[in-house]
Image (cartoon, rainbow, N blue to C red):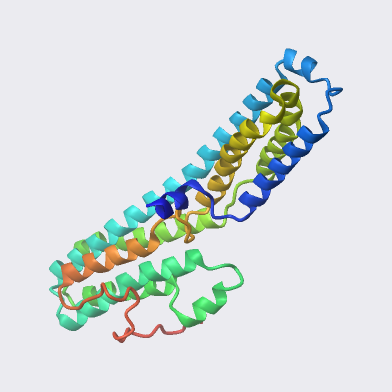
Amino acid sequence: MLKSISRYAIPEDRRFWSVNCAIVFYTLGVQFVDAHAFPSQRLLQTNAALLTSAIVGLLLVLRTNSAYERWWEARKLLGVLVNDIRNLSIKCKEFAQLDETESAVVGALLVEFVSGLTVHLRSNATKEKQSEGLHRTPINVAQLIYRQIHKLNQSGRLSDIEMLMLDNHAKGLMDAYGGCERIKKSPLVGSYKLMLWTGTVTYFLILPWLLVPIIDNLTILPVTVAAYFVTALEFFAEEVEEPFGRNANDLPLDDICESVAASVSFVLRECDLVSECRPSSITLPPIKNAS
């Protein structure tokens, strides 16, 4: 249980410990020097500590809100994606009366789209070309899904109205893909982060000098507590603003893949797609004229 709590109470970024250790040693140095010549009384009379605390607190609130908005937007996009895939599997099965082979192909394509999207969102720019060489990209899979729908329409098993209904859900796949990619490739403005770190560093440079003349050797306690909460919020915000990784606070993409595989397998009832989110045992139709 303690291990589970520590995953959410302590940021996984190693810089968190470096920053906190630096603040603690700096505070200890201030206590050792104990320079009472520092004009702390004048600063206290002007509420300097309160003013800097308010500024840092405001910046942290804005930082946390902007990071969580990105996380929540990504979660809504993935929720809509899951619903579109479920609707596609249900309507394809019922409208076209798919046989066993067709159900396996459609199910494999739907599951592969989600797993391919997961690989794409988690890949770095340097590794993206390698992953695309090993697996189909979400765009390729979406193209194959449209191809299957078009074949069913051309063979008369889907009416034009039914094809339009399926097209609405197929379009939702690419909408989710584009929305998630926009979040991944649009980081927060660097100047905003710089201002927050500048305010935080300035705050912890001044705070020990204000407290040492008042509480002397006990200064290390409130400074350490303040450093933990301020820096933890910043590093947690950095994790949350990139919601597609593997940290404890990132979106559970693997669980979403398994949920999609279970739903598609249940609807089509022709193949078990839960055990492997990227089924390799099913032969998918090739993509013509694709680079």
Q: Residue at x 38, y 58 (%)?
A: 252
In this rendering, does residue 136 appear at all? yes
24 to the left or right of 77: right
Q: Quadrant of residue 108?
A: bottom left
Query: Could you tell me residue 138's position as x and y percent?
Result: 42, 70
* Rendered position, 162 above or below 76: below
| Residue placed most toward the observer, 152 or 44 | 44
Query: Could you tell me residue 22's position as x and y percent?
Result: 71, 46
Residue at the farthest top position = 45
| Residue placed most toward the observer, 198 or 127 | 198
202 to the left or right of 13: right
| Residue placed most toward the observer, 248 or 164 | 248
In this rendering, does residue 146 appear at all? no
Query: Could you tell me residue 132's position as x and y percent?
Result: 50, 77
Q: Residue at x 15, y 72 (%)?
A: 96
* Rendered position, 123 above or below 279: above
Query: Could you tell me residue 235's position as x and y percent?
Result: 58, 47
Q: Quadrant of residue 177?
A: bottom left
Residue at the farthest right position = 37
* Rendered position, 267 above or below 9: below
Q: Residue at x 76, y 22 (%)?
A: 213
